[in-house]
Image (cartoon, rainbow, N blue to C red):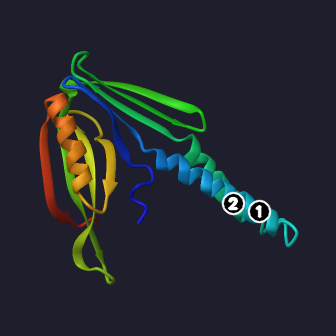
């Protein structure tokens, strides 16, 4: 339902470089949640200070969305992937050589519950598989078209293999 919150978009693209960042709707939704949380806090404060903590926590989650930054820069000229992530102004930067990356993968996630039946497709996830270490998460969505487009762009620029796995696997 909220696939567009926290989703990546192509910010800049050339034949040798692609830059991905979070969509603007993430910040917009964050501001809406902050304002709604503070508005609800003002109305619940006279009833009970304890009840007012719930909308205040919701406003804090909105502040987290407003301050959330994520930027991935696949640079073939430099031969690196630069990852810059920030939340509440606290950041983490990582540089990964492109030869450490194996493939860009878009895979279906399985849902196995009574509501959806046995092992139906719930959503799709896109990530970059490393030769050594944990995969680099890109994005997830209920539909694979947008993820495939981003994965194709990354595979083209970084000269990585593109894998699409549409079969859902049970997550036990």
- Using the image as rendered, state which of residue 149 and residue 155 is in the foreground: 149
Seen in the picture, residue 131 relative to 78 is either above or below; the reply is below
Horizontal side, residue 154 vs residue 2: left or right: left
Kind of element beneath mark 1: helix
* Residue 153 image offset from top left, x and y in percent: 20, 38
* Residue 111 image offset from top left, x and y in percent: 28, 71
Are the residues at dot 2 and dot 1 in contact (C-beta closer than 8 Å)?
yes
The answer to which image quadrant residue 21 occupies is top left
| Residue at the image point whose x is 19% and y is 29% from the top | 158
State the residue position of label 2.
Answer: 37
Mark 2 crowd level (few <14, some 14–19, many ≥20, 10 Å Cα): many
Quarter containing the N terminus = bottom left
* Residue 129 image offset from top left, x and y in percent: 22, 40
The answer to which image quadrant residue 114 occupies is bottom left
Seen in the picture, residue 4 relative to 104 is either above or below; the reply is below
Q: Which mark is residue 41?
A: 1
Residue 71 visible to the viewer: yes
Identify the residue at the far top of this view. Answer: 78
Disc 2/disc 1 C-alpha distance (Å): 6 Å
Seen in the picture, residue 168 relative to 86 is either above or below; the reply is below
Horizontal side, residue 90 vs residue 81: left or right: right
Quarter containing the C terminus = bottom left
- Using the image as rendered, state which of residue 4 and residue 91 is in the foreground: 4
| Count of numbered tags | 2
- Using the image as rendered, state which of residue 4 and residue 74 is in the foreground: 4
């Amino acid at each position: 339902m909220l696939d567009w919150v926290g989703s990546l978009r192509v910010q800049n693209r050339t034949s040798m470089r692609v830059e991905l960042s979070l969509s603007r709707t993430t910040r917009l939704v964050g501001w809406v949640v902050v304002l709604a949380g503070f508005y609800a806090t003002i109305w619940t404060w006279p009833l009970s200070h304890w009840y007012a903590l719930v909308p205040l926590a919701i406003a804090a989650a909105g502040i987290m969305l407003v301050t959330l930054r994520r930027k991935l820069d696949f640079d073939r000229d430099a031969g690196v992937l630069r990852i810059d992530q920030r939340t509440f102004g606290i950041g983490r930067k990582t540089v990964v050589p492109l030869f450490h990356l194996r493939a860009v993968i878009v895979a279906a996630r399985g849902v196995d519950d009574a509501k959806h039946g046995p092992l139906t497709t719930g959503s799709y996830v896109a990530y970059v598989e490393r030769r050594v270490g944990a995969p680099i998460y890109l994005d997830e969505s209920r539909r694979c078209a947008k993820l495939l487009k981003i994965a194709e762009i990354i595979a083209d620029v970084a000269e990585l293999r593109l894998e699409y796995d549409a079969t859902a696997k049970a997550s036990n």
